[in-house]
Amino acid sequence: MPAWPPRRRVPYSRLPERAWRAVAGNNPPTAPIGLRALPSRMDDLTAHAALGLALRIGASMLAVGASCADVTSTMLRVAAAYGLTSCQVDITFTSITVSFDREDAVPLTAMRIVRMSRLDYTRFQGVTDLARAIGAGDLDIEEAHRRLDRVVAAPATYRRTVNAMAWAGVAGCFCLVLGGGWLEALLAALTTALIEQVMRVLNRRSLPVFFQQVAGAALATGVAVLLLAWGVEVRTSLVVAAGIVVLLAGLSLVSAAQDAINGFPVTAGARAFEVVTLTAGIVVGIAGVLDLARRAELPLTVVTTAPSPVPFPVALAASVGIAGFWSLASHARPRAVGLAAIAGALAWTTFWALSAVGAGTPLASGIAAVVIGFSGEVLTQRLRVPPQLVAVCGIVPLLPGLAVYQGLFRIVVGADIEGALAALVGALAVGLALAAGVTLGEYLGRPVSGERDRFDERVRRRAMTID
């Protein structure tokens, strides 16, 4: 009989090693932490010029209204077009820092302070077109710097008179959406034009924005009190609500929520604090005038409106006017103004349809924002218009200006803390729903538009908390 080979004994000490091999993972690391810089053959002079160009483009985009996610992805794309593939970008609301990590050398780091300005979609489009041309490899660094100089140094798209008339149009149309008549709309437009001129003068005198908000809110409320004292038969709360929308606190809230969702907590926190500060200015201005009116024993009242307070055709036309005038006030070109007006019509139609079937205001606003965000991401790349124009201008008719005024009114005049909190929390819910809806719509639209690339993916993964 053949002899069986002796049985090999497995040492007991090797069992933990075999067990570990059975469960150990072989996937890539959970996150690219502390990676070594890739080798680069670029000389220091060229690297400095490319880094400065990316920093200038990012600062220009952030100053005219771009989101932090878009700014970061654009800067990474521009830097990579010139060979800077190991870059880090950090945004802290008032500054941008970019660093190029070089192998066996000290990293190149540059920082630029960002002075925030109002939305300017013409410059925004010029900067994004330049970044797209750089990404395609069509421009050298010096020519790109010269083109950027022409974009940022270009004169304003419209005269100041046109800008003031646009803000007046926003207020008048918003008054119609809230259920006001033509007289209320006219008074709201004239009041807003006056507020715009006063705030322009205060801005030239370098008065802090907080006090500009106080002055604007006090002026809007003061006009309403004067109308009441003179016995003019109008719903004065609509005039004040239209002025509040133009003071922009609602859109700051939307921007803060978008940055938080996209994984930029520092910038989101700064924007949120700015919202609190600017809203406090509005509160001080309104509360001061309302308190004076109450002491003068004027019978102040505030209107309550249903989600669809006016016939659909009137509200639709007013929403078109709000979005179109808002884009005009934000220095958009005529073609972009028409596209923004269509976005306003689409947003209001979606909101009205959902409200008609019983959806609440936050839910209807959020779904309408998803539709607008998706449409903006899919269509505007083909039409050469910034997606933010469609998203921002489209949701303006849905901003909760009247709810904010109702809450403040109940606190100052009626001492109804419970009702005031309900109104203010409802306004906050609408603002968050609009922000989340726009962000989700843009996310769903990027695969369809074909604009998503590795730089965009790199930025969007910052918001992910799981593998």
Image (cartoon, helix red, strand yellow):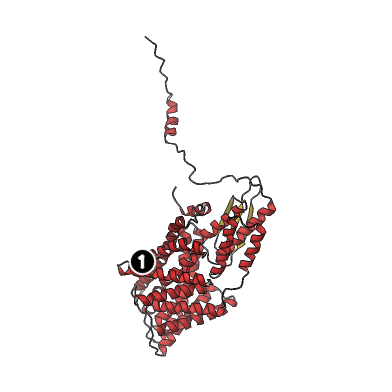
- Residue type for callout 1: Ala
Residue at (40% x, 63% y) in the render: 371
**Of residues 297 and 303, the one drawn nearer to the viewer in this rendering:** 303
Which residue in the rendered view is the most extreme toward the front? 382
Instruction: Name the one closer to the observer, 241 or 148.
Output: 148
Residue 77 lies, in percent from the top left, at: 57, 55
Which residue is most to the bottom?
230
Looking at the picture, does residue 345 appear above or below residue 461?
Answer: below
* Snapshot quadrant of residue 407: bottom left
Using a 10 Å C-alpha cutoff, classify the residue at mark 1 as few (fewer than 14 neighbours), some (14 to 19) or many (20 or more): many
Q: Is residue 240 above or below residue 391?
A: below
Query: Between 417 and 140, which is closer to the camera in this rendering?
Result: 140
- Residue 399 appears in the figure: no
Q: Where is residue 6 in the image (x, y as percent from the top left)?
A: 41, 15
Residue 421 pos. (x, y %):
37, 70
233 above or below 310? below
Left or right: residue 106 versus residue 209 is right
Q: Name the residue under label 1.
A: 364
Report the side of 340 relative to 310 (left or right): right
Q: Residue furthest top?
A: 1
Identity of the residue drawn at 64% across and 60% down: 144
Across and down, in percent, residue 295 comes to 41, 85
Residue 143 placement, left or right of 294: right
| Count of number-bearing discs | 1
Q: Is mark 1 on a helix, strand or loop?
A: helix
Is residue 64 visible in the rendered image? The answer is yes
- The N terminus lies in quadrant: top left
Q: Which residue lies furthest to the left in this view?
A: 357
